[in-house]
Image (tube, rainbow, N blue to C red):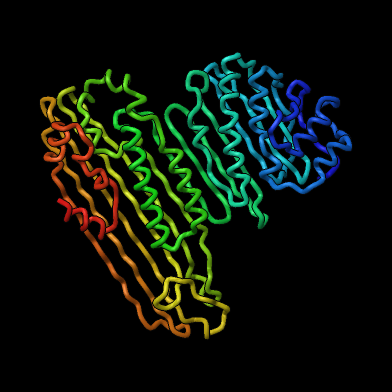
Amino acid sequence: MSSISTLSNWQPASRYAAPASGRSLNPVVARLDAAAGTSPPSTIVALSPEALAAAAAPVSTGQRYHELGADILKQLGTGSVIPPDHAKLPDTVDNRFGLSVTTRSGAKLELTLANVDDEMIFQVSSSAELKDDERQALAGLADAFQAAIDGMAEPNPQVRLGGLTRFDHQFVQSIDFHAEVKTADATTQTLDFSIDDARRKVSIGGPDGKAEVNVDTGAVEHVGTRQQQAKAINNYLAQFDQAVSRGHGDKRLMAMFKDAFSDMNRTATSEERKDALAADSRWQLNSDRSTLTGLSDFSASVTQTPTSSNPRKPLEQDNFSYDVSQSTTVKTPTLNERAISQSQQSHLGAQFHTAIEKSSAPFFDGTPQTQNYEYHQIDDSARSNVSLNFRDGKLNKATLEQMANQSERVQTFLLGKLTKDKTTPSQQSLVRDLLPSLTTYERYKTEEALNDNIFLLGSPGELVARNEQF
């Protein structure tokens, strides 16, 4: 590390305290301890021999930002001075982590941590003076903010946003988190997260591809129990694993997508919203919600960056894309007559090369002798719909419809010439009357009366197996 540190708009009142006994010493924090209290903001400061010694060893991005975000938020909670605005950041930084919090009173706090080579840059500002309760709410985000930073600072970036979804709604209105980190191969991985009372959104971008998860948390009618949500999320994660395996997708990108999907869909549950649901007599029956996934409505997608692995045929790209969504409609012309419909959709598109009659990738070096391979093109889709109808306050119709279509085209090449072109389609559907199961549920009040796995999407083979269960 160099012997200078840039402190942009850094106030003495926001100065780092020495780590408490037992905490690991961050060399970057040591530099700030040595310099921040004696120099005015936005200046170059000379470091003490102790600080230079602490900073001598090279540090990773994770080590560089270890505990920094949490420390700043905790100190803001104790009443540290927050300037009304801040100086402009450099046009180019190596890594950047930003947190923007809007309070219920309308105040907006912005915090940025960044570095250029070995120079650390810290910025914090607020549009208005924060109340004590608001400061405490910010301090309560310290560990969650640090977890989000630590995840993205890993050698293989990870999504760790669960903590930021559990903010104090009494004092915090919305949160935005932004991260951009330079990876080992000098590319940039980005993460953007936004949350308020009605929605959650995550966008991921990087060299492997992009992903996005949107969750609508404004409606409370169809949210389920904590157990329901956990089962639904686990079933979806299993589907994502199947999709990335079938489509030969990038597992690192899919891992980030799965983490984002899990964190965003662990929303408030019916146990936590008993008052809101109990006040609405339309939801006095438990059986209608028990047939649904229990998740808030969402849309999610992951798209891999296309590559051309065969130098002789650059148009034969390797690619992977997957999208999935859920939408719920509740029609209530009267309290005793209503209709509920929940639909789920998914689509997988993928193209990839394999060695002939193998699942492994072929070797290409541009010579004709390496042009023996298979080129796969996959196009799968699935749809599921649960419909419930009530008359005179009683359930009189409940149906489940599912359909799955799969198509795989395999072209076989020998010495670069097409020798075989085969397309294998597959289609299955399932239609079930749910009234008998729901009647059993109402009688015994047990979820074992319902096989909730049938309400999630599956492959044609899985639909056949499910149909045979009844």
* Left or right position of 279 against 308: left
Q: Residue at left 49%, top 70%?
A: 315
Q: Quadrant of the N terminus?
A: top right
Image side of residue 79 versus residue 32, left or right: left
Residue 438 is situated, as x and y percent measured from the top left of the image, at 16, 37
> In which quadrant of the rendered view does residue 335 lie?
top left
Callout count: 0
Q: Residue at x 45, y 68 (%)?
A: 352
Pinpoint residue 188: horizontal percent, then vertical percent. 63, 50
State the residue in front, 18 or 454. 18
Residue 100: quarter of image: top right
Q: Nearer the viewer, residue 11 or 269?
A: 269
* Residue found at the far front of this picture: 22
Describe residue 294's horizontal placement relative to residue 74 as left or right.
left
Position of residue 144 measured from the top left corner of the image (x, y, whole percent): 56, 33
In the rendered view, does 411 fall on the left or right side of 58? left
Q: To which quarter of the image does residue 377 belong? A: bottom left
Residue 176 lies, in percent from the top left, at 55, 33
| Residue at 58% over, 55% down | 207
Residue at figure coordinates x 24%, y 35% from the top left: 290
User: Is 56 situated above or below 200?
Assistant: below
